[in-house]
């Protein structure tokens, strides 16, 4: 399960995005979490312009998301909100959000702090979690399962039309292509069921309207659409790389 801090953080950022306070322009920096005496000055979801100066006092800790990934700043000290010119390139982020050459993007399942396996590509549909799913491109859309032991049959049902189709995951694989005859568009909803799965998974699709070249903009756009599973995956991947993607 997600920690209480993560849930509260996500909710705060989502509210900011939906009310227009959390829109992140390219080169802006997004506050992920803050602790210490200055925490009230940096609420989760606050955006900082690239030329902003961040002043922290002793005991402060501030995690921000910018064009290079996550950074954790600690007080006392004054920092620039802009990503350091010397920061490492965001190659791993590029692989995570790639909509092409997905075969190359398979770097193994991302694991979050709760040790739950997650897809290695941001646009793969997690068949084990009900969520709103943002889609950048419908071509090449894939389904993902957390294990790869044995064949598994998944039934997809369009909630509006009632049409169903089956998809088979072959033994040793975690991905399967989305059926071409099942439309994916803004607001389309599907129910996913499989043997030995007690509760059906509900997926609602939404159009991704962010810029995939910028981590902070991507995070803000995902939350604005309510795509919480993808946001969690993005933050977990960035933090797993030590904030230098």
Image: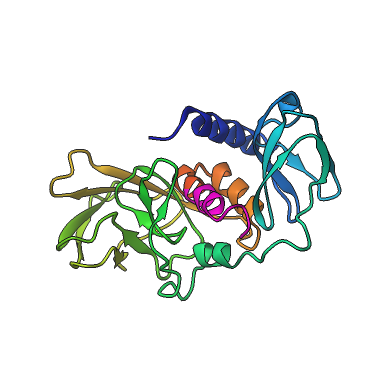
* Rendering quarter of residue 56: top right
Horizontal side of 112 relative to 174 (left or right) equals right
Task: Identify the image quadrant of the C terminus.
Answer: bottom right
Task: Identify the image quadrant of the N terminus.
Answer: top left
Figure check: 195 above or below 141: above
Tell me residue 173's x, y (percent). 25, 67
Name the residue: 27% across, 51% down. 161
Tell me residue 221's x, y (percent). 60, 49
Q: Nearer the viewer, residue 212 or 137?
A: 212
* Rendering quarter of residue 78: top right
Figure check: 26 above or below 235: below
Which secondary structure class fits the magenta region best?
Answer: helix
* Rendering quarter of residue 105: bottom left
Q: How is the image coloured?
A: rainbow
Tell me residue 49's x, y (percent). 81, 46
Magenta residue check for 243: yes
Name the residue: 54% across, 55% down. 208
Figure check: 106 above or below 207: below
Tell me residue 188's x, y (percent). 39, 50
Q: Nearer the viewer, residue 19 or 97?
A: 97
Q: Nearer the viewer, residue 202 or 181?
A: 202
Magenta residue check for 151: no
Q: Tell me where the magenta segment starts and ends, as one range.
A: 233-245
Name the residue: 42% across, 66% down. 107
Name the residue: 18% across, 44% down. 197
Horizontal side of 13 relative to 101 (left or right) equals right
């Amino acid at each position: 399960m997600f920690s209480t801090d993560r849930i509260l953080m996500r909710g705060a950022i989502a509210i900011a995005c939906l009310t227009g306070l959390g829109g992140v322009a390219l080169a802006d920096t997004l506050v992920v979490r803050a602790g210490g005496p200055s925490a009230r000055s940096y609420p989760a979801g606050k955006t900082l312009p690239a030329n902003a100066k961040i002043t922290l006092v002793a005991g402060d800790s501030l995690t921000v998301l910018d064009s290079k990934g996550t950074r954790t700043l600690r007080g006392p000290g004054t920092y620039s909100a802009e990503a350091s010119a010397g920061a490492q390139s965001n190659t791993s982020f590029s692989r995570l959000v790639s909509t092409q050459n997905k075969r190359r993007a398979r770097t193994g399942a991302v694991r979050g702090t709760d040790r739950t396996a997650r897809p290695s590509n941001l646009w793969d549909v997690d068949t084990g979690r009900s969520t709103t799913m943002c889609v950048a491109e419908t071509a090449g859309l894939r389904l993902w399962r957390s294990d790869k032991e044995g064949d598994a049959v998944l039934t997809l049902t369009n909630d509006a039309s009632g049409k169903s189709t089956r998809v088979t995951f072959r033994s040793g694989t975690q991905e399967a292509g989305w059926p071409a005859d099942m439309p994916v568009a803004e607001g389309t909803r599907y129910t996913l069921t499989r043997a030995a799965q007690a509760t059906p998974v509900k997926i609602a699709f939404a159009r991704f309207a962010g810029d995939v070249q910028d981590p902070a903009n991507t995070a803000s756009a995902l939350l604005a659409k309510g795509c919480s599973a993808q946001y969690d995956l993005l933050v977990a991947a960035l933090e797993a790389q030590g904030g230098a993607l």
